[in-house]
Image (tube, coloured by chain):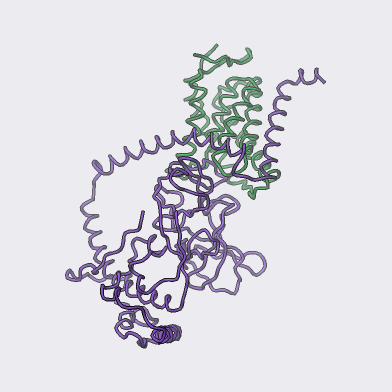
Chain colours: A purple, B green
Amino acid sequence: MENIIKRHWNLSILALVLVAQLMALAYQVRKPTEHGSVRLIRLWAVSAITPFEKGFVHSVDGVANGWHNYVYLRNVRRQNDQLRDEIQRLRLEQVRLTQDANQAWRLQSLLGFKEQYISETMAAQVISSTGSEFTRGIYIDKGSRDGIKRDMPVITADGIVGKVYSVFPSSSLVLEINDPTSGAGVILEKSRLQGILKGDQKGTGETYVSNIMADERIEPGDVVLTSGGDRVFPKGLPVGTVAKVLSGQESFLNIRVKPAARLDRLEEVLVITKIVEKAPDANEAAAGPIRAIDILAQRLPTVEPPKPGEKSAPPPTMAELAVRERAAKKAVQQNAAGFNAPAEGNPAESKAAAPATPGSKPAVNPATPEKPKLNTGPPENPAKEPPR
Amino acid sequence: MAASYSSREQFEVYRFSWITAILVPLMALLLQAYLPLRLPFFDLFDLPLLVTIYFAVSRRKPVTGMLTGCIIGLIQDSLTHRPLGLYGMAKTVVGYAASSLGLRIDVDNPGSRLLMGFAFYIVHQLIYFAVARGLAIQSLTWRWGHELIAAVANALLAVLLFAVLDKFRQRT
């Protein structure tokens, strides 16, 4: 035996190293854990690598920022003019959407819907990827010292990115939604179909919603939002759009979703550190917590806070609430039937919301923007800054 | 200070300073983690694998080669969320095989480096895939087309990278 080992010394060492790794692998598969000895190895490795990555990223960003902000300013004046025009157009659109959102909030509060609100977020810089084509993950420069915890959702202004998978003292690993092992509860905005968004098992980086009934009508371009069913992402965050509808097994469909966030070009992300769940209050709809979808889509307007008079108004009596509820239900039924009749409660509000009803023409068509009038100006209450 | 790594004497014998032996794999790991953020196509390459192959064939010591591959692979594993040992085992075997090959053929020739890069990439991916699916119960799908393209890309990069790394090696 000893002679055999001596004769095949190199092979024996190879076998020994492989067996040791196999046993470690078996241990991890049998007892997956974030703590213990395996966690310690990861902690050492990540702690050793992260400072170099941070230094590297900050140096590269510093040089790039210097170049773009102080040297390479070609066409900036023309872009400024274009952006000014765009702002004017969006302000007009904001007025219309604000009124729609106001009405939706009032109806929701009357019907007692509970919603999740993003209460606190933390901006983080992406410092590296996992460096493996078999996994889709990124490292951010915030960790347990900053209050980051496992399973916190990570988003950008465009849409969801993923969730925190591992937390280290000064960095965290974020598992992106296109990783083969990830999953997120989603809903199609138009058809209200729910499903689970998963990364492609082939590791192509594409995302799919599988096992949708084939008799459902789904078209490319349909918007996909988070459903809130996974208890990780708040409801209503943009996920992406339907890129292709593919036939799956038996009578099911698979939907390829193009993520709204640029997962392959992430530089900064927001970690949602606190989510509160509550029924919206009509009085504090504008002044209270900001809805998840509003904090994300900074291009979209937030609701104007109520006027001082409204805020200090006494709480409604039970009889008034009953009247409002009836009016709200009636308005919902009328909207569903495609009518454009004013609601009972407040004719002025109904009038303001009229462009949102089916069949009516919106005040401004975003697809064919008109030349904005200069005296239109911004709304009285500009969009609220998201909490950081 | 030079390390005592050296080869058997029928071929050129090389060694590396400790600084090179530590910094080159570290840089490979850093670049592998950073570059895909700016250049998404860089996912295709596996710099730590190429560095493992280079050190293994230059040192021509199977035990050293496999240990180099094992350490680089385990660090690479620890940066992902998958179990430790997938890259570790794949790179251990590649390190051993590359250093054993270095004892038998001339690995300084660009042609042999190209073939070596191609073959070891495929071997590495096959081992990773087999271990991940068979032992770690990970859901992965093998794509021949993608892997062949990646193997060619890595082989081409290997020729360039090895030529650069040749500057850091020292004859004994």
Q: Is A324 located above or below residue B86 in the figure?
A: below
> Between residues A48 and A247, which one lies in front from this camera angle?
A48
Instruction: Using the image, determine if residue A73 lies above or below residue B90.
Output: below
Residue A279, percent from left and from top? 45, 71
Closer-to-camera residue (A131/B45): A131
* Residue A69 locus on image (x, y percent): 26, 44
Residue located 28% across and 40% down the image: A67
* Left or right: A92 in relation to A199: left
In the rendered image of this protein, does residue A112 appear above or below residue A155? below
| Quarter holding residue A57 | top left
Left or right of B32: which side holds A381?
left
Q: Position of residue A25 (x, y in %)?
A: 67, 39
Q: Residue at x 32, y 40 (%)?
A: A64
Q: Position of residue A365 (x, y in %)?
A: 31, 73
Horizontal side, residue B26 vs residue A383: left or right: right
Q: Quadrant of residue A121?
A: bottom left
- List the single residue furthest toward the left: A375
Does residue A56 appear in this view? yes
- In this view of the protein, which residue sits in the foreground, A119 or A238? A119
Q: Quadrant of the N terminus of chain A?
A: top right
Q: Residue furthest right?
A: A1
